[in-house]
Image (cartoon, rainbow, N blue to C red):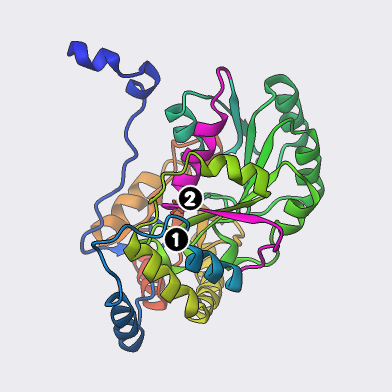
C-alpha cells in the first residue's frame, strides 16, 4: 500500500464505500423514491421560479424562506429551532461530528438505516447495534442493558423503521428516552406514509431531537433534511454546519415545492393505497411472509435460499429491488420493494408469476 494511504484513519480504510446500484433503464424500486413525476404545469411554474435565481451570489446562509415553508407544512412547535442539511445524511454527519468525544458511542437498533453506523465510523465514534426482536419490535431489556453499559451519546430510532417498515411501542420508546444519558434522535424519514409523529416526545423530553427529510415524499434529488430541536442544542450544531450547505437552486426549488406541498401529500396518499395493493399481491406468493409497513416500501421474507434468485430474476426483467439477505441475521431471505406506480407494482407481480 502507498505510504500516503497509511495517513488515512484505519477505521476509514476498513469501510467499504456505500454502494448504489446502477438503475439505468430499470423500473427502480430499490431506494424509496416517490415514483410520480411533476405534471407539465408544475414543471413550467418551477422553471419560471428558478429564473429569479442569481447563481453569481452565495445562497442565504440560513435559508429562512425554506424554513418558513417547512413550518407551514409541518407541525414544528414554534419554540423549537430548525437546522437544515444537505439531506438528513448531512445532519447525521453534523450531529456526530459534534458528539465525537474520544470513546463516545452511537447506539441504534438493528436492522436499521446503515448511515447511522457509517457516519459514526466517519466521525471516529464507537457504534453499538442492538438487535430488534424477531417481529422487529424493540427488545426493551436488551436496549436498556446496552444503554447502561455503553452510555451512548446518541441513540437513533427511526419511526417507521427502514428496512422493516414498522413503528414501535410508545411506552418502550419513552422508557428508552428516559434511560438515555444522551440524545435520542427520532428519525421520521417515512412520516408522509404514516399517522402520528414524535413532536410530542420532542416537547416532553429535553434530550429528544426530531429528524425529517423531503427525500421520501418526492424530493430525493433536492437533498434537503431537517433537524428540529431546542435552540440551545441547535445553536451549537449550527457552528459545525457549513454556511452554504443548502445551495441556491435547492433553496429556490424547496421554496417552490413547499408552496405546492398538497401535490406531494396527494401522491403520498396514492402510494399508501398502492402499498396495500402490493402487500396483498406479494402476500399471495406461496410461502412468502410480507411484513406490515407504515412506510413506502414492503419487506418480504421469501422461502429459504431463494432471495438471490428472485432478486436476479426481477433484475433480468428490468426491475430493480433491494436484496437484504446477508445484511443482518434478522433479514435472512429478505427482499425490500419500494412501492412504485400502479403499473410498476403490476409489473413486479407479473414478473414474480414467471419466477416461480
Ligand atoms: C432514506 C432515509 C433517510 C433520508 O436520507 P436523506 O439523506 O435525507 O435522503 C433518513 N433516515 C432513514 C431511516 C432513511 O431510510
Q: Is residue 288 left or right of residue 311?
A: right
- Residue depicted at 79% across the width and 33% down the height: 179
Q: Work out whether 123 lies above or below 277.
A: above
* Residue sitting nearer the eye, 266 or 75: 75
Picture coordinates of residue 41 (x, y %)?
33, 89
Q: Residue at x 81, y 40 (%)?
A: 175
Mark 2 element type: helix
In the image, which residues are magenta? Answer: 74-103
Q: Quadrant of the C terminus?
A: bottom left
Residue 338 pos. (x, y %): 44, 61
Q: Which residue is mark 2?
A: 88
From where the camera sits, is residue 64 visible? yes
Q: Residue at x 55, y 77 (%)?
A: 269
Mark 2 within 8 Å of ligand 1, using the beta carbon: yes
Of all residues, the one furthest to the left in this rendering is 2
Q: Is mark 1 within 8 Å of ligand 1?
A: yes
Q: Is residue 170 left or right of residue 326?
A: right
* Quadrant where the N terminus is found in the figure: top left
Does the residue at mark 1 contact the one at mark 2 (Cβ under 8 Å)? yes
* Disc sitting over residue 215 in the figure: 1
Q: Would you place residue 253 above or below residue 333 in this image?
A: below
Residue 112 visible at all: no
Residue placed most toward the observer, 321 or 195: 195
Residue furthest to the front in view is 57
- Residue lying at the far top of the rendered structure: 3
Mark closer to the observer (1, 2): 2
* Residue 156 drawn in magenta: no
Mark 2 packing: few (<14 Cα in 10 Å), some, or many (20+)? many
Residue 101's disc number? none
Q: Is residue 268 above or below residue 306?
A: below
Amino acid at each position: 500500500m502507498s505510504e500516503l494511504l497509511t495517513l488515512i484513519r484505519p477505521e476509514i480504510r476498513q469501510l467499504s464505500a456505500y454502494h448504489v446500484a446502477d438503475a439505468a433503464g430499470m423500473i427502480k424500486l430499490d431506494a424509496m423514491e416517490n415514483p410520480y413525476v411533476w405534471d407539465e404545469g408544475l414543471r413550467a411554474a418551477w422553471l419560471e421560479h428558478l429564473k429569479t435565481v442569481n447563481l453569481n451570489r452565495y445562497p442565504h446562509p440560513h435559508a429562512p424562506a425554506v424554513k418558513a415553508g417547512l413550518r407551514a407544512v409541518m407541525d414544528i412547535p414554534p419554540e423549537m429551532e430548525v437546522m437544515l442539511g444537505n439531506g438528513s445524511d448531512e445532519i447525521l454527519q453534523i450531529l456526530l461530528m459534534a458528539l465525537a468525544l474520544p470513546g463516545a458511542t452511537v447506539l441504534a437498533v438493528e436492522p436499521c438505516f446503515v448511515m447511522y453506523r457509517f457516519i459514526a465510523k466517519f466521525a471516529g465514534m464507537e457504534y453499538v447495534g442492538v438487535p430488534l426482536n424477531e417481529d422487529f419490535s424493540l427488545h426493551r431489556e436488551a436496549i436498556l442493558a446496552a444503554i447502561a453499559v455503553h452510555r451512548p451519546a446518541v441513540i437513533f430510532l427511526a419511526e417507521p423503521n427502514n428496512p422493516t417498515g414498522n413503528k414501535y411501542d410508545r411506552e418502550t420508546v419513552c422508557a428508552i428516552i428516559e434511560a438515555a444519558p444522551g440524545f435520542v434522535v427520532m428519525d421520521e424519514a417515512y412520516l408522509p406514509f404514516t399517522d402520528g409523529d414524535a413532536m410530542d416526545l420532542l416537547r416532553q423530553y429535553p434530550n429528544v431531537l426530531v429528524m425529517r427529510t423531503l427525500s421520501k415524499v418526492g424530493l430525493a434529488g433536492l437533498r434537503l433534511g431537517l433537524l428540529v430541536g431546542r435552540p440551545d442544542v441547535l445553536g451549537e450544531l449550527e457552528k459545525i454546519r457549513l454556511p452554504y450547505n443548502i445551495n441556491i437552486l435547492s433553496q429556490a426549488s424547496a421554496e417552490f415545492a413547499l408552496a405546492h406541498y398538497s401535490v406531494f401529500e396527494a401522491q403520498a396518499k396514492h402510494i399508501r393505497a398502492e402499498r396495500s395493493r402490493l402487500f396483498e399481491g406479494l402476500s399471495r406468493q406461496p410461502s412468502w411472509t410480507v411484513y406490515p409497513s407504515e412506510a413506502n416500501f414492503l419487506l418480504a421474507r421469501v422461502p429459504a435460499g431463494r432471495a438471490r434468485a428472485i432478486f436476479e430474476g426481477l433484475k433480468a426483467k428490468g426491475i430493480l429491488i433491494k436484496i437484504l439477505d446477508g445484511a443482518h441475521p434478522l433479514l435472512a431471505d429478505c427482499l425490500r420493494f419500494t412501492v412504485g406506480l400502479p403499473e410498476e407494482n403490476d409489473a413486479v407481480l407479473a414478473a414474480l408469476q414467471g419466477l416461480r
